Amino acid sequence: MAIHPPEQTIWWNERIERGELVWIGVAFLWGVIMFSMMVYWHIDGKQNLSNEAYRIDPGVFEQRTEEFTKKFTVREDKNTGYPVAKPPAGGDVYMLARLWEWWPMLELEKGQTYRLHLSSLDWQHGFSLQPTNINLQVHPGIMHVVTLTPTETGSFGVVCNEFCGLGHHQMVGRIYVVEAGKSQ
Amino acid sequence: MSVATAETGIIGGIAAKFRTCPATGLKIDLAAEKLIKANAVAAVVFLLIGGLFGLLVALTRWPAVHLLPSDWFYLVLTAHGLDVLLLWILFFEIAVLYFASAVLLSCRLATPRLAWLAFLLMIVGGLMTNVAVLQGESSVMFTSYVPMKAEPHFYLGLILFAVGALVGVMVFFGTLVIARDERTYEGSVPLVTFGAITAAIIAVFTIASGAIILIPTFLWSVGYISHIDTVMYKLIWWGMGHSSQQVNVAAHVAVWYAIIAITVGAKPLSEKVSRTAFFLYILFLQLASAHHLLVEPGLSAEWRIFNTSYALYLAVLGSLIHGMTVPGAIEAAQRKNGFNNGIFEWLRKAPWNNPAFAGMFLSLVMFGFLGGISGVVLGTEQINLILHNTIYVPGHFHATVVAGTTLAFMAITYLLLPLIFQRQVIWPKLAMIQPYLFGIGVAGISLFMMGAGTLGVSRRHWDITFSDATVTFDYPATAFLMMGLNGIFAIVASLGGILYILITVGTVFFGKKVDASNVVASLGPMPEKQVSGAVHEYGSAGTWHLPGTYILVSVFFLSFVLYYFVNWKYLSEVWPLS
């Protein structure tokens, strides 16, 4: 039994039954397939995480985001008063995370590709774009540049899903997606 | 047996007192026995505290109940993780290590005084961190990601606890050396001890990682270090945080093998295969830190793919092997016990009314189907994009750590009570249903959290209605339903947990004394042949034919493949990103 020393002192020479060998083979192959899926998705899949990231001083990132917002704000959000920035299609987009908000709101066009720059000014935050369900970790001092292509129109929430203190659950941002050439 | 009949052995000039276990014939060092009891009792106390915190968490996340205010919720959630994930499990694991070395090898425990020091350090450290959390200035979650800062004694307590655990692991290794030196066993160590060695080796890596990150973080919290890199912190912290879960896996698989050996007389199908599977854990599990860095900025895809898959899913291979050899060993033993009709008589007539066996089998099934499959899916580089930090994550690890590890530890308690505490389990009828109650509760918790997570619900979040937020978002109604069901099943699991604690504590204080005349009966219902064959004899699995196991494993494998590709399908539907 398993609570006693092996019956055969030379247990490593015992024959392995065929059934066991077959299962080990199947399990190993399944591992190879799962490994290959991740590689394959980088070649042919459309959802991969960007490697592009830079060390950045939080103050510098804040300044860049403010410049971006100043330049592209098209309106104030109706109920909340947040600035809504609508950058040109294909351009650079900034959104900052801080205790406890995502700033500014964005308006993007469906089918266009944007370079989204994300960073935090204080603690770690979680960028959880809902309901499409994309989740990214946001660090202070590191700017993550993610290329994103909205495929549906509507109003999307950016829920913070990394615990960031007492106001964590109040930290929600918004991204509007509209048809190309139109506005909200 | 009582101390009166203990014999004193003087080996190498060191005296140790032993008693002989009437069920197994093993010589049990009385010093080891006391330490096993102390660690197990501490474990159960922290399970009670941490479990109740968990219930409060679930009741707050049930939108219709929403029990606690936000500051208390985050405080209690921090304490819940600390008390059950760290304290309950590690105290119990130290008990398992002493059991798998001193008891199973009939050896005296190395340096019992140091082992008591280890125990004391763990208690002081555990209490210190608990106090820090309850004081309210350290609600940083179990993970305490920098630059969020806790009070210095939060980190100091963790460090003391880890040092204590490390000393305990060293006592275990010392005991192995003594056993070999004093030739207390023949040939190789038993498979269960081999599994415990696996757990202990990974534990050393784990605790070292913890020290490397927690000591600087402590110094940072008191102001001696100005900056801790946030990504580096996660990399090394999870070298502790995730690898310690692999300690649990190795330990609870070892516990599975121990339980099936004692309750149905199961023998490993192949020592070579089972030991190799454990060895794969040692070689590859430590790469798991990467599971927590799949959506962080600045890490290369190559690094992520290699590490998140444990090289080539080689540690998963270890678990897949145990997933076949454990039920296979049960089938082989049960067929030898006379249940040889058809494909599933062996399973139908397994001792389902023995809580040790029932708990072990539920642990096996749920760890595989719920915890294992979801873990691989969650740890797939790109699929992590749709699951990271959603409540799917706690759904997954409640299936592994609660349904897997905790339930396995509860199950073996029903054997340790008569064998080590020498008390008959009180309320055998209630004990019989306890694993089912707890198991059903945990299965519900895991499934509904995973369901809500698939719908995007955030983990560690006080209010998914965003009632006091400036900007809001509406989660789908199904998500609310799932969080409600999670709350209901958390109540069921809590009832199972409370029952476990009542039975355990009641047995320790009021259980009937166990002696040679009733020890076998005290281990709970078992197959007749197994009982008549006595626990200490073992047969050979020999050449076997295991149609039932093949079918079970095939069902598992198909579920795995199907669920894996369903999640790729989900991923392919979200916005393209690169």
Image: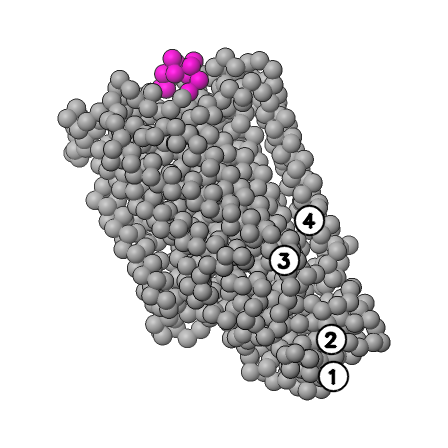
Q: Give me the C-alpha separation between circle 4 and circle 3.
A: 13 Å
For mark 2, what is the residue? Answer: A107
User: Between marks 4 and 2, how big is the CA–CA gap?
Assistant: 29 Å
According to the picture, the residue beneath numbered tag 1 turns out to be A74
Q: At label 2, which amino acid type do we have?
A: Glu
Q: What's the mark number on residue B235?
A: none
Marks 4/1: CA–CA distance: 38 Å
Q: Chain of mark 3?
A: B
- The circle drawn on residue B567 is 4
Q: Quadrant of the C terminus of chain B?
A: bottom right
Give residue B456's mark.
3
Residue B429 drawn at (x, y percent) = 39, 28
Q: Nearer the viewer, residue B467 or B264?
A: B467
Nearer-N-terminus badge (4/3): 3
When the figure is inspected, residue B433 is found, relative to residue A93, above or below; the finding is above
Residue B144 visible in this rendered orientation of the protein: no
Cα distance in 3D space between marks 1 and 2: 9 Å
Q: Where does the magenta region start and end?
A: B526-536
